[in-house]
C-alpha cells in the first residue's frame, strides 16, 4: 500500500468534524507555504535588481503603482 493510499484510508476513518478540521489545516498550511514562496520569489527579484535594501514603504508603493498600471490597462474606463 502506498503512503497516499494509507493516508486516504486514515482520513476516511475520521469523523466528519475531524475531516473538516484536517482540510482547514491543510488549506491553511498550503496558503502559508504559497505566501512564503511568493515572498522568496519577490525577495530574489529585489536582490537581482539591487533593490533589496529598499524600505518596505518603497516596495509597497512600487507594488501599488504596478497594480494600478495593470488595472488601468486591463480595465480601461
Image (cartoon, rainbow, N blue to C red):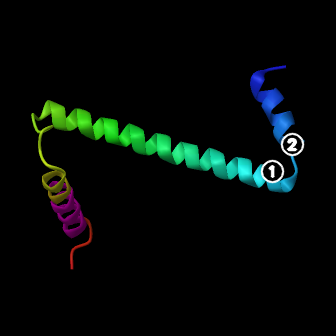
Dot in front, 1 or 2: 1
Q: Position of residue 2 (x, y in %)?
A: 79, 21
Q: Position of residue 3 (x, y in %)?
A: 76, 23
Q: Nearer the viewer, residue 3 or 58?
A: 58
Residue at 11% over, 44% down: 54
- Image quadrant containing the N terminus: top right
Region rendered in magenta: 62-73
Residue at 13% over, 49% down: 55
Residues at marks 1 and 2 touching, judged by CB atoms closer than 8 Å: no
Q: CA distance from mark 1 to mark 2?
A: 10 Å
Mark earlier in primary sequence (1, 2): 2
- Image quadrant containing the C terminus: bottom left
Q: Residues within 10 Å of mark 1 (few under 14, many from 20)?
A: few
Tell me: 17 left or right of 32.
Answer: right
Q: Residues within 10 Å of mark 2 (few under 14, many from 20)?
A: few
Answer above or below: position of 7 versus 22.
Answer: above
The chief SS type of the magenta part is: helix
Residue at 60% over, 49% down: 27
SS at mark 2 in the image: helix
Tell me: 21 left or right of 37.
Answer: right
Answer above or below: position of 2 versus 49.
Answer: above
Q: Is 67 part of what is drawn in magenta?
A: yes
* Mark 2, residue position: 12
Amino acid at each position: 500500500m502506498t503512503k497516499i493510499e494509507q493516508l486516504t484510508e486514515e482520513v476516511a476513518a475520521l469523523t466528519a468534524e475531524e475531516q473538516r478540521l484536517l482540510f482547514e489545516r491543510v488549506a491553511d498550511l498550503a496558503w502559508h507555504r504559497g505566501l512564503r514562496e511568493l515572498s522568496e520569489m519577490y525577495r530574489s527579484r529585489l536582490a537581482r535588481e539591487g533593490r533589496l535594501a529598499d524600505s518596505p514603504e518603497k516596495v509597497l508603493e512600487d507594488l501599488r503603482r504596478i497594480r494600478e498600471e495593470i488595472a488601468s490597462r486591463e480595465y480601461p474606463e
